[in-house]
Amino acid sequence: MLRVEAPEGRAPERRYVLDLVLGERLGLDWELSPGPAGRVTLLHDGSRLTLPDMLLATDRDRWLTPSSLPLTPLTRAAIPGPFAAGLVEPELPILYGDPRGDRISPIIITEGGDAEVSLDIFGSIFFLLARYEELVVATRDEHDRFPALASVTGGREHLERPLADEYVELLWAVMAHLWPDLRRRSPRPRLHLTHDVDFGRFAQSATLATAIRATVADIVKRREPGLAGRRAAAYVGGRIGRDVRGDPLDRFDDLMTVAERHGLRSAFYFVASRSGGPFDATYDIAEPWVERTMRRIVQRGHEIGLHASYASHRDPSRVRLELERLRAITERAGAAPDGFGGRHHYLRWHNPDSWRAWSEAGLAYDSTLGYAEAPGFRAGTAYDYPAFDVAGGERLALRERPLVVMDVSLRGYLGASPEDTYTRTVELARRARRVGGSFVLLWHNTSVVGAAQRRLYGELVAALAPLFG
């Protein structure tokens, strides 16, 4: 049994992060007892490991204020070789702690067999997972989203590292040095292939001018005259009220086939209500093609989930209504899942309203936490984890499954080439796997319309699947 001595303040926050790190992640039995202010001490087998207590020691007047945020730019500490094996890089960015000078080792092993780590590991992990800064910093983009550059870890060098997981790995490395008899839980990494269904039929999503440009591009740029014909037929048919077979956006079977080739399941998140005008989905979930598509998804053993509408991210009642509508349609399609998960449209997410709305609606997991404009680890982790409402000071009955890479982030926001998209995605997956984590990929059905697009997706999944097999 591991004994933990910690100050008594911020009890819900402290128990949450201790249980997540020591219990859920490492699989250790532990008990908590009161300890002196300013530090957290782990005791086992006659030795002790001491860490500073900084974020969770913040007094009430400074809690959730700018003065409680980490100082920027973040300092980097050099981690000695034996303790850096589980890190992405041996120099670790520091959120809270005293690294004893820039790039100086923060780990001291005393002659008596004890250890000191001058990093607030538990506070830093809580800061990242609970998205603490998103209740402090008011900056939002035109879609009411917290932008990457507003975060203390928003630069590429920090965002593309699973920092919370690296802090866990550092803690474990020191614990294993002190107490070699301890055994940690083995992670179960998974590759999650997810698909937000924003557009289901070409005629519903394109103006005449857009349809003409896309059809010409099919012939001139993509050299796919067959696709051009199907696109034109789908557009004309849709405009006269016919659902033409072979719609270019109907790539659901292709996505499932790629997943099945590697023994994986795809998750398709459908919009159940249109609440945001021009920003929402162009289809209605009650349309016949939706039920037919869901039936195929169910028959092939894949997942259906909720893509909550544009205006729902701070509206619990709307989320409940949309979930009820989705459940009714899926039951008609022959599916009766034990629990639904999903993602907010446009990756709109507000702390803590969005988590609370999903928790109160009874959803099992959310997978929104990624930045639209950049790939990476917004919550600092490649693991799914229990949500915590910082404003309310309580753990929620909901798990977050953080999004790491979205196709539109690379292709649309960053203008990445197919080659760069492939390279950056695989590298991020390798970093997730290095810390034993999972990997959530979002690829829209609109991104596999052309043959080259389908080839890129197939090659990408083929590269990712062995990392998480």
Image: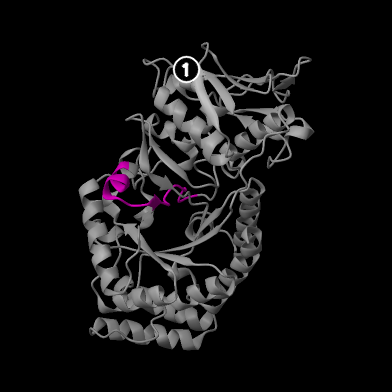
User: Where residue 397 sits: x, y (%)?
Assistant: 35, 43
Colouring: one colour
Q: Name the element at disc 1.
A: helix
User: Where residue 315 sits: x, y (%)?
Assistant: 24, 46
Against 268, residue 403 (above or below) is: above
- The magenta-colored residue range is 356-373
| Quadrant location of the N terminus in the rendered image | top right
Q: Per the image, is 191 magenta?
A: no
Label 1 crowd (10 A; few <14 / some 14-19 / many >=20)? some
| Quadrant location of the C terminus in the rendered image | bottom right
Q: Per the image, is 361 magenta?
A: yes
Against 292, residue 403 (above or below) is: above
Q: Which residue is mark 1?
A: 57
Q: Amino acid at mark 1?
A: Ala
Give residue 141's quadrant in the image. Answer: top left
Query: Seen in the image, is 251 located left or right of residue 464?
Result: left
Q: Is residue 1 visible?
A: yes
Query: Seen in the image, is 107 located left or right of residue 371?
Result: right
User: Where residue 452 sits: x, y (%)?
Assistant: 57, 75
Q: Is residue 153 visible?
A: no
Against 167, residue 349 (above or below) is: below
